[in-house]
Image (tube, rainbow, N blue to C red):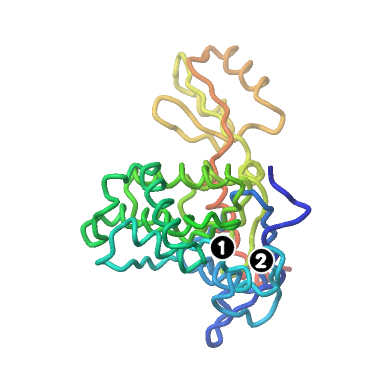
């Protein structure tokens, strides 16, 4: 269960500039304990910089953050697991030893780390690679080994920067299963991505950032709810003149038409179509996915700076 009374992370007004350019410009975040929380945004939006400030890897130019109850994130480093965007393991190390080594850096005894590493590798379907050197593993397998190294000490908070990047579909599925297993253990998971499908399946809450600013915060359903539902209508008798009966935004889509659900509902339109002899062969009403909501939110953010020029 997500604990909103005692968040794992609180960030207020985080700002980071590189030169004269603000990469992160006043971002606020509240990550509930026990939640899977996504930080979404296009490439260059400031996701990695935000995560690094939250972890204390770099200091903000202004703003505050609290991580696991402390305003000094590095004081909680042993309770945090981190998978950076830039992957890196010692190529001559065996997979089991690489995981144990990462655990030792967080205070886990070596023998216990090796024992846990064997169990984690087996549960991730990589038991056969336990004694293989990192250089012998595929890129996807090595990435999963590094992820296992970030959770071997059973952290309270797991921070993953673009964790799905470069993984094939099989390893993406394994990674999703690992994230959910960590959440079920009680950990808080914070991850960044620009791939909406993973976020839609995994996130309890998410923030969308673009141009260094937070443009949305809430649940997946709240993001999707910002767009009107879409109707897909397939006539039984597609006679000429059908388009004149449909809403102005209707677009031909294969053997049917797609348009926004009218504000007054669909019943009146369907009655008119039936009375006009077109009939109904198929009808579905769906909420747009997170991808469509993301495109709308990011697109509006890109257009926002130009708005004052058109003001009367």
The residue depicted at 64 percent of the width and 60 percent of the height is 215
At which x and y percent is residue 180? 52, 43
> Furthest-right residue in view?
5
Whether label 2 touches label 1, CB < 8 Å: yes
Q: CA distance from mark 2 to mark 1?
A: 10 Å
Residue 80 numbered tag: 1
Q: Quadrant of residue 136?
A: bottom left
Residue 70 as seen in the image, left or right of residue 294: right
Residue 67 numbered tag: 2
Q: Residue 162 versus residue 68: which sits nearer the camera? A: 68
Give the secondary structure at mark 2: strand
Give the secondary structure at mark 1: strand
Vertical arrangement, residue 251 with respect to residue 129, above or below: above
At which x and y percent is residue 310? 66, 68
At which x and y percent is residue 186? 61, 47
The residue depicted at 47 percent of the width and 55 percent of the height is 152
């Amino acid at each position: 269960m997500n604990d909103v009374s005692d968040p794992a992370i609180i960030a207020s007004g985080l700002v980071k500039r590189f030169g004269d350019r603000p990469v992160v410009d006043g971002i606020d975040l509240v990550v509930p304990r026990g939640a899977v929380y996504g930080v979404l945004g296009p490439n260059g939006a400031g996701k990695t910089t935000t995560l690094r400030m939250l972890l204390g890897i770099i200091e903000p130019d202004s703003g505050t953050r609290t991580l696991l109850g402390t305003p000094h994130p590095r004081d909680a480093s042993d309770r945090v697991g981190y998978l950076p965007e830039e992957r890196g393991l010692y190529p001559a190390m065996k997979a089991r030893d690489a995981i144990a080594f990462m655990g030792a850096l967080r205070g886990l005894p070596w023998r216990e780390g090796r024992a846990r590493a064997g169990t984690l590798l087996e549960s991730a379907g990589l038991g056969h690679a336990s004694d293989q050197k990192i250089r012998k593993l595929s890129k996807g397998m090595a990435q999963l080994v590094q992820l296992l190294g970030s959770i071997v000490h059973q952290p309270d908070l797991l921070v993953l920067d673009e964790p799905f990047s470069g993984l094939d579909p099989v390893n993406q599925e394994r990674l999703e299963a690992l994230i959910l297993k960590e959440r079920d253990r009680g950990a808080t998971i914070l991850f960044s991505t620009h791939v909406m499908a993973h976020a839609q399946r995994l996130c309890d809450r998410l923030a969308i950032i673009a141009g260094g600013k937070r443009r949305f915060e809430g649940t997946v359903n709240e993001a999707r709810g910002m767009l009107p539902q879409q109707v897909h209508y397939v006539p039984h008798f597609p006679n000429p003149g059908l388009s004149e009966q449909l809403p102005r935004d209707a677009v031909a889509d294969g053997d049917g038409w797609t348009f926004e659900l009218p504000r007054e509902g669909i019943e009146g339109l369907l009655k008119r179509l039936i009375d006009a002899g077109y009939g109904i062969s198929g009808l579905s009403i769906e909420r747009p996915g997170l991808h469509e909501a993301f495109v709308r939110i990011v697109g509006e953010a890109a257009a926002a700076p130009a708005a004052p020029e058109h003001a009367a």
